[in-house]
Image (cartoon, rainbow, N blue to C red):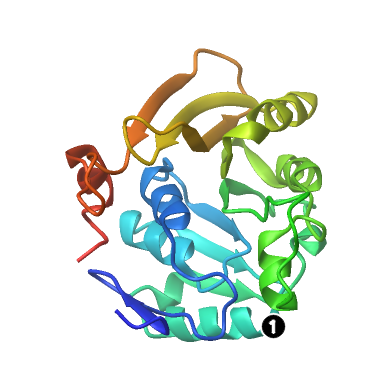
Amino acid sequence: MSNDWFQFRQFLVRQDQSAMKVGTDGVLLGAWTACENCRTVLDIGTGTGLIALMIAQRNPDANITAVEIDAAAAQQAVGNIGESLWADRISVLGADFLSVDSAGDNKFDLIICNPPFFTRSLKNPDLQRAQARHDDDLPLGLLIVKSAELLSDDGRLALIIPAGRVDEVMSIAADNELFLSRQLNIRGNSLAPVKRVIIEFCRESGGAEIAELVIESGVRGVYTEEYKRLTGAFYL
């Protein structure tokens, strides 16, 4: 693998123009999120188009809108999607997510996002990468409020966030009448603390499915069977 591109089983991701490269967070989110019955999907901050491509591979009936505010990344997503098997089902919108019209029938069965979530850490001097990693331009609160407006009645919102922000996100979601339906706590290995959490919200309250995933078996670079099963349709 070159740092300029990443080869998956069914598609290639070029990433030299995007601040955020292919990473474990995005792959896990795209592989785990429930998308089987979703006809309309919105991928917020698509970057290279990775998650949009993963959802398109998993669901042959999904029509996906991939939103990206950074012009260079949006253009790269257009190229990656254009070279894929699913170019007719994915459209890239080079715009601010907050500008997406929520009126009328413009609703989505799934909204998915690997959001910028660093709020107090030292910013990267690379402005493009800082924008992709920090939530100054799209705070989690605004992301959730806007997503609630755009979800269909049976729609779901899926995010991957740091474990330390789960309570905050749960509270904001509840204020917008979104309720936890599934949660995946992620550990780097069995002895490591939970650092990332994937959470999925819906409009109906009820019992939530909570699970845990360990990525590595204890030896660096040796992955657990559970991780390989989850991502096996994508990684070579």
Is 133 placed left or right of 163 in the picture? right
Residue extending farthest to the top is 207
Q: Position of residue 57 (x, y in %)?
A: 32, 61
Q: Position of residue 233 (x, y in %)?
A: 23, 56
Q: Position of residue 58 (x, y in %)?
A: 32, 55
Task: Point out the image quarter for the N terminus.
Answer: bottom left
Is 159 placed left or right of 208 in the picture? right
Q: Nearer the viewer, residue 207 or 187?
A: 187
Element type at marker 1?
helix
Q: Report the residue at 58% width, 34% height from top.
A: 163
Q: Report the residue at 54% width, 34% height from top.
A: 199
Above or below: residue 233 compared with residue 204: below
Is 225 placed left or right of 64 in the picture? left
Q: How many numbered callouts?
A: 1
The quadrant where residue 46 appears: bottom right
> Callout 1 environment at 10 Å: few (<14), some (14 to 19), or many (20+)?
some
Task: Point out the image quarter for the C terminus.
Answer: bottom left
Q: Report the residue at 37% width, 73% height from top.
A: 86
Q: Position of residue 62 (x, y in %)?
A: 44, 57
Is 28 placed left or right of 11 in the picture? right
Give the amino acid at mark 1: Ala
- Which residue is tagged 1? 71
Above or below: residue 69 compared with residue 187: below
The quadrant where residue 17 appears: bottom right
Q: Nearer the viewer, residue 75 or 16?
A: 16
Q: Report the residue at 76% width, 61% height from top.
A: 100
Q: Nearer the viewer, residue 173 or 17?
A: 17
